């Protein structure tokens, strides 16, 4: 009887150890690719081709490091081109480098996690127009909000942030990222 009890205890111990090994650690580095949408919104009397906003889309790459359940560090690059039928004769590109922190709380299951967060950081936005042969660079603070969903090593994030480029010009970027956590 003692042999059966010891054997049962050994099997239960091994199975519980295997179950513990299935728990995911959601801290660490995540590398992601992004689909990006941008908008430059004009307030007041400013207009471009009679419109008060310009829409662009493109791609990006993002690096996230989750320090713990609350704090994360983010950095990335996006590149977009104008995609608006109201601006057929206008050719513009925007490049953005950004880095910042996100603060929220990560709710965890055994193999999944969800983290709603707020973000703040610094970005450099370079706006180029080949139509007018002009280029402008802005170094500004951004604020944003988003949510990340993780399953095992895969992560999807939806995030929107904004920067005031000038008194009446607001730059808004939304990103859907899909990534892998190392």
Image: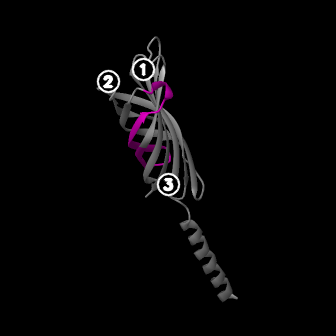
Q: CA distance from mark 2 to mark 3?
A: 47 Å
- Prevalent SS, magenta region: strand
Give the labeled residue for mark 3.
26
Look at 47% across and 52% down and name the residue there. Answer: 179
Give the labeled residue for mark 2.
132
Q: CA distance from mark 1 to mark 3?
A: 38 Å
SS under mark 1:
strand
Q: Is residue 89 left or right of residue 2?
A: left
For the record, the magenta segment spans 60-88
Task: In the rendered structure, find residue 169 and report the number of the disc placed on it.
Answer: 1
**Coordinates of residue 48 in the picture (x, y in percent):** 43, 18
**Coordinates of residue 143 in the picture (x, y in percent):** 45, 30
Which quadrant does the N terminus fall into? bottom right
Look at 44% across and 40% down and name the residue there. Answer: 58
The stretch drawn in magenta includes residue 80: yes
Q: In terms of sequence position, does the residue under pointer 1 or pointer 2 come before the other?
A: 2
């Amino acid at each position: 009887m003692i042999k059966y009890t010891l054997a049962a205890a050994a099997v239960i111990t091994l199975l519980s150890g295997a179950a513990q090994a299935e728990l995911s650690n959601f801290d660490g580095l995540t590398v992601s690719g992004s689909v990006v949408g941008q908008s430059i919104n004009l307030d007041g009397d400013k207009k471009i081709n009679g419109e008060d906003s310009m829409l662009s889309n493109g791609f990006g790459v993002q690096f996230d490091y989750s320090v713990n359940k609350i704090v994360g560090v983010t950095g990335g690059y996006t590149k977009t081109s104008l995609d608006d039928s109201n601006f057929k004769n206008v050719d513009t590109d925007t490049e953005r480098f950004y880095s910042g922190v996100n603060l929220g709380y990560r709710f965890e299951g055994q193999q999944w996690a969800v983290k709603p967060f707020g973000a703040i950081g610094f970005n450099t936005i370079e706006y180029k127009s080949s139509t007018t042969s002009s280029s402008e660079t802005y170094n500004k603070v951004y604020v944003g909000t988003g949510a990340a969903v993780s399953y095992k090593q895969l992560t999807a994030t939806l995030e929107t942030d904004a920067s005031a480029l000038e008194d009446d010009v607001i730059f808004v970027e939304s990103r859907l990222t899909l990534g892998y956590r190392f």
